[in-house]
Image (cartoon, rainbow, N blue to C red):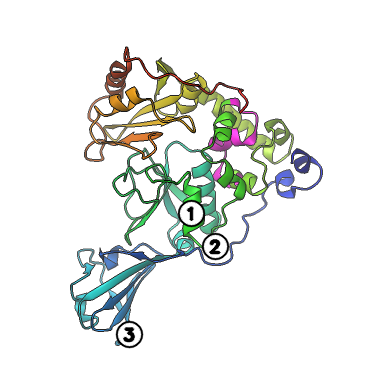
Amino acid sequence: MGNRIVSCGGAALRGGPSRFREVMGVAGLRSRVSVEAFAPAALLPGAAARVATDAGARVLFERHWDGVLAVASAGEPRWLARDRSVVVKRGLPLPDGLAPGVVRDIALDFDLGRYARDFGVAALPEVPDLDSQVAAGLFEELAGGSASFVRLPPGLEADGMLNLDVSSGAVGLRQPFRFDGSKAVVDHHFSRGERSALAVLDREFRGVEVPGQALELAHTEAEHRALLSGDVALGLAPYLEPRLVLLLAREGALLEPVSRLRGLDYWGPAVDRALAARDAALRAPVRVVGEVALVGPGGVLAGFASGASAVVEVRERGGGVFVSARSVPGRALPGRLVSALASLPGVRVGPDSSFAACAGSDGRGIPGPAAEVAAQLARGLEGRGLERGPVLERGREF
């Protein structure tokens, strides 16, 4: 694989991506989503609702850039008002007398490609990794080459848009993909049996070509080791532009040595910038209690580099404090850490206990300065006899 980059192929890597690959086909849902109710005026761009009544009538609601069009099986198409208080609900008649009878079935469709082209905004996690970077690159590609992103701390999701890998904390639902017409969430941390958001995208949407190498490496021990060593391209994924991470994955080059990429005209500057960002992340302050590292915003890499088997990140945002905890791949969070996190209001722990997030009881964060929240967690950990186990060390082979 290494020789391909330098001498016998891999032209995109040698010269850099001249443009995004033209996307053909429709990135639509593989199966419709059944819901109890939706607000037509709140439908996302690219969304459509197919409604059937008990009188045999059918109505299609479809969101366009300038409004919502309702097409009834018997009647003229009609543009609907932008009133979000109007709701179509099972068991109720359709608004504005669109069709006879009461609503029996509602099935939602979502064309991710059209959403990306028409809207071009998605929510991503504040802490990037291979999973979210490739997902962002795919979304940019669907949008035509550029897109805007809202960065969210774990525990939150953004209304009125697509949420990719945001770790929203919907632990009660445990659904890898949720769509209610006005918000779409691709979430794996709080879903059972889902290792990555990329796996969910690959399964749920036609026309979204997730690179096989990214599916293979996302949230694995190999990714963790690469992040700690920084020796291969995979270790720089959080610090490169999403489109470049997507290109590396497509070329099967995520495990190529960084030294080879630095020698290529196009890649050299991007790699140097990523290495500088990684070095800065490694210098973040870390407080280690037992086998748990407590860090501030952007300190996750430094926490794991300290030899910790779990890292807790504490950050302030908009007047609230947000907490997330993650373990090394294949390990659950230490029991004492889970107990300490339980003292926080609104904390949620993933089904496999490898991830936890707290956005406060109301989703606005925990009241109080971040330093006080971190100190509270440290007090809960100190002297508790944390479970010990094999800790991944920098440079260790698997």
Q: Mark 3 or mark 2, which is nearer the start of the sequence?
A: 3
For disc 2, the marked residue is 207
Assign a secondary structure to mark 2: loop
Q: Mark 1 or mark 3, which is nearer the start of the sequence?
A: 3
Quick check: 264 left or right of 301? right
Quick check: 57 left or right of 195? left
Residue at figure coordinates x 32%, y 60% from the top left:
180
Residue 38 vertical placement versus 235 (above, below): below
For disc 1, the marked residue is 201
Residue 390 vertical placement versus 233 (above, below): above
Q: Quadrant of the N terminus?
A: top right
Pick the residue in front: 354 or 57: 354
Q: Is residue 189 visible?
A: yes
- Which image quadrant is residue 222 in? top right
Kindly report the distance in space between the C-alpha atoms of the residues bearing marks 2 and 3. Answer: 29 Å
Outermost residue, top side: 383
Residue 191 vertical placement versus 234 (above, below): below
Outermost residue, right side: 7
